[in-house]
Amino acid sequence: MNPAFGAYRSVGGITKKGGLYKNDYPKEIQEGVKASMSVLHTGGILLIASSLLEIFQIFPQNLVVYVSWGLCMVLVVAYAIHFKRRFGKYPEVMPCA
C-alpha cells in the first residue's frame, strides 16, 4: 500500500492537482504556494524508496523506518520554515501564527 500512496503523492506533486492545491489563498501568491506545496509531495518519493527497501529487506527494517520517519520530519519542518518566511506577511495564509 505504501508504494501506491507514494506514487499518488509523487504524481500529485508533478501535476499540481489534488485536494491540497484547492485553497483560498490570495491570488497574488497562488502560484508560489502551489510550487511550495509540490516540494512537500517529494515525500512520496521517500515513501516509495523506504517501502522498497523494506520489501526487499536490503537494510534492517527498524533502520529503514527510523530513517524514513526522520527524513519526513526534517522535510516537514523545512517546509514550514520556508512557507513562513516566504508567505508569513499574509495573515490569511498563516492561521496559527
Image (cartoon, helix red, strand yellow):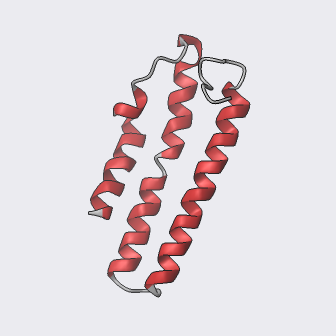
Q: Is residue 45 left or right of residue 28?
A: left
Q: Quadrant of residue 23?
A: top left
| Residue 72 position within the rendered picture, expressed as x and y whole percent measured from the top left | 54, 58
Quadrant for the C terminus, please: top right
Question: Do we see residue 17 in this rendering?
Answer: no
Q: Nearer the viewer, residue 47 or 70?
A: 70
Q: Nearer the viewer, residue 36 or 14?
A: 36
Q: Is residue 76 left or right of residue 24?
A: right
Q: Is residue 4 left or right of residue 52?
A: left
Q: Residue at x 73, y 32 (%)?
A: 85
Q: Residue at x 63, y 57 (%)?
A: 74
Question: Do we see residue 10 in this rendering?
Answer: yes
Q: Residue at x 72, y 20 (%)?
A: 89
Quadrant for the N terminus, please: bottom left
| Residue 59 position within the rendered picture, expressed as x and y whole percent measured from the top left | 47, 86
| Residue 41 position within the rendered picture, expressed as x and y whole percent measured from the top left | 46, 46
